[in-house]
Image: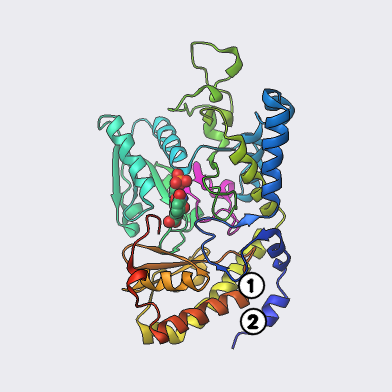
């Protein structure tokens, strides 16, 4: 028996729960898709809108330090991912940043033409590779192989390998340092998609000698729906990596308004257009909150929550036909836990109707995000108890729970 009360009483992160506005009666297990609302966000966003925009008008680009926000927030994110100052900017979407990183990496490794990833990666990663392939008229070739075959598939033509650190469906986590070393040993560069890792565990990009990385602002960073993403470019590459999306905010002197593009000297060259200030304000609240937490404690609690979840699932797995979708060893997973079930979609709708919010990924994966800042061990045990009840009563088996929503 796991002593839930003892674990919650000893939880050094328990006080963070108070910093989030979560609806009563909800157990929110989808923070790996859209993080919860920090209580400080509405007033900060209102301040940006009413005072900085309303009163300050255009002067706020200087006076309220809007113009430096991508770099300022980037530096804070750098501390969360084990990178250095001036290696990260908060900007654009993860999808756009993937494109920027791919194009820059290929230009750095220009004797080679393949961009390689794994089948089943998050679709936007693969789609961005395919778009670059089309745009280049085949000069750059997008290729995806089975996850276990990636390293073997790197050959003398492979310019860059794009991998997701924690898999969005299964939660499977790659060894960043060992994988980067293997990629480098074969002469390719490594881009890491940290969307499901940042804010969920300590990360060490510098130590791992990663070349590029991207990640979402709206998942474990709690930056709000559509929050700007981030882009990491290792300092050693910045001078030689020319941005393909050479927008004016990445110019060395944007307000000189010259006809000719000249890239800014550092990480700022990876900015494109005008920063979305309201979105960045929400992101900064989430990042500031995350900076107050110890990432080792976050990881330890995530593993502890996963243990409670798996322990609760043990009697349900065989009886109701669930199978674990991710690695059996929790150390090899990120901060969500997934199970396959042929009626997974309907079961998830039944859970949502009872206040347990997870999500579903085709064809049969039920995902449960374990966010250490606002979940307790008791929450997890309660969620599994509700799942048990839904299965025992057959309450999931209703026509309305089979109707697919636009966003699952
Ligand atoms: C691994 C991964 N990469 C990228 C994205 C997408 O990024 P965006 O839609 O913000 O561009 C997501 C989630 O949507 C994701 O899970
Ligand atoms: N970005 C999302 C959205 O706009 C709507 C719904 C979900 C998302 C997601 O982030 C999905 C997420 N990346 C996933 O892992 O499935």
Q: Are marks 2 and 1 in contact (CB under 8 Å)?
A: yes
The quadrant of the picture occupied by the C terminus is bottom left
Query: Which badge, 2 or 1, comes first in the chain's sequence?
Result: 2
The quadrant of the picture occupied by the N terminus is bottom right
Q: How dense is the environment of label 2, judged by Cα within 10 Å: few (below 14), some, or many (20 and up)? A: some
Which residue is painted at 50% across and 80% down in the image?
386
Q: What is the number of the mark on residue 376?
A: 1
Secondary structure beneath label 1:
loop
**For residue 263: magenta?**
no
Q: Is residue 4 above or below residue 95?
A: below
Q: How dense is the environment of label 1, judged by Cα within 10 Å: few (below 14), some, or many (20 and up)? A: many
Q: Is residue 255 visible?
A: yes
Residue at the spot of label 2? 4
- The magenta segment is 191-216
Disc 2 C-beta below 8 A from ligand 2: no
Q: What is the number of the mark on residue 51?
A: none
Q: Is residue 42 above or below residue 256?
A: below
Provide residue 97's location: percent of width, then percent of height.
47, 38
State how far apart marks 2 and 1 are (Cα).
9 Å
Q: 151 or 336: which is nearer to us?
A: 336
Which residue is painted at 32% across and 37% down in the image?
131
């Amino acid at each position: 028996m796991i002593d839930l009360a003892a674990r919650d009483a000893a939880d050094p992160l328990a006080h963070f729960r108070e910093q989030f506005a979560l609806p009563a009666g909800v157990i929110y297990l989808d923070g790996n898709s859209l993080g919860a609302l920090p209580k400080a966000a509405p007033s900060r966003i209102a301040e940006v809108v009413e005072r900085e925009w309303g009163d300050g008008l255009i002067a706020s680009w200087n006076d309220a330090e809007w113009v430096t926000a991508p770099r300022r927030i980037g530096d804070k994110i750098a501390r969360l991912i084990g990178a250095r100052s001036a290696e990260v900017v908060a900007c654009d979407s993860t999808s756009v940043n993937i494109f920027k990183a791919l194009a820059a990496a290929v230009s750095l490794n220009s004797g080679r033409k393949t961009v390689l990833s794994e089948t089943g990666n998050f679709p936007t990663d693969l789609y961005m590779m395919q778009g670059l392939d089309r745009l280049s008229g085949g000069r750059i070739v997008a290729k995806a192989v089975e996850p276990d075959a990636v390293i073997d598939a790197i050959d003398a033509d492979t310019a860059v390998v794009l991998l997701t650190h924690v898999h969005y469906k299964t939660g499977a986590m790659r060894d960043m340092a060992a994988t980067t070393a293997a990629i480098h040993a074969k002469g390719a560069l490594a881009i890491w998609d940290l969307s499901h890792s940042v804010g969920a565990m300590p990360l060490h990009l510098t130590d791992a000698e990663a070349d590029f990385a991207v990640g979402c602002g709206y998942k474990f960073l709690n930056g709000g729906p559509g929050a700007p993403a981030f882009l990491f470019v290792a300092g050693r590459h910045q001078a030689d990596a020319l941005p393909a999306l050479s927008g004016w905010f990445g110019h060395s002197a944007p307000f000189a308004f010259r006809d000719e593009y000249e890239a800014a000297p550092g990480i700022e060259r990876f900015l494109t257009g005008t920063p979305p200030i309201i979105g960045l304000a929400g992101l900064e609240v989430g990042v500031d909150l995350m900076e107050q937490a110890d990432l080792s404690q976050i990881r330890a609690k995530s593993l502890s929550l996963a243990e409670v979840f798996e322990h609760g699932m043990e009697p349900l797995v065989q009886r109701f036909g669930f199978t674990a979708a991710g690695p059996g060893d929790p150390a090899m997973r990120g901060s969500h836990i997934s199970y396959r079930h042929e009626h997974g979609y309907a079961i998830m709708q039944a859970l949502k109707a009872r206040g347990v919010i997870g999500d579903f990924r085709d064809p049969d994966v039920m995902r449960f995000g374990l966010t250490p800042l606002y979940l307790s061990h008791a929450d997890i045990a309660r969620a599994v108890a509700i799942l048990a009840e839904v299965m025992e009563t057959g309450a999931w088996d209703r026509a309305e729970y089979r109707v697919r929503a636009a966003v699952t």
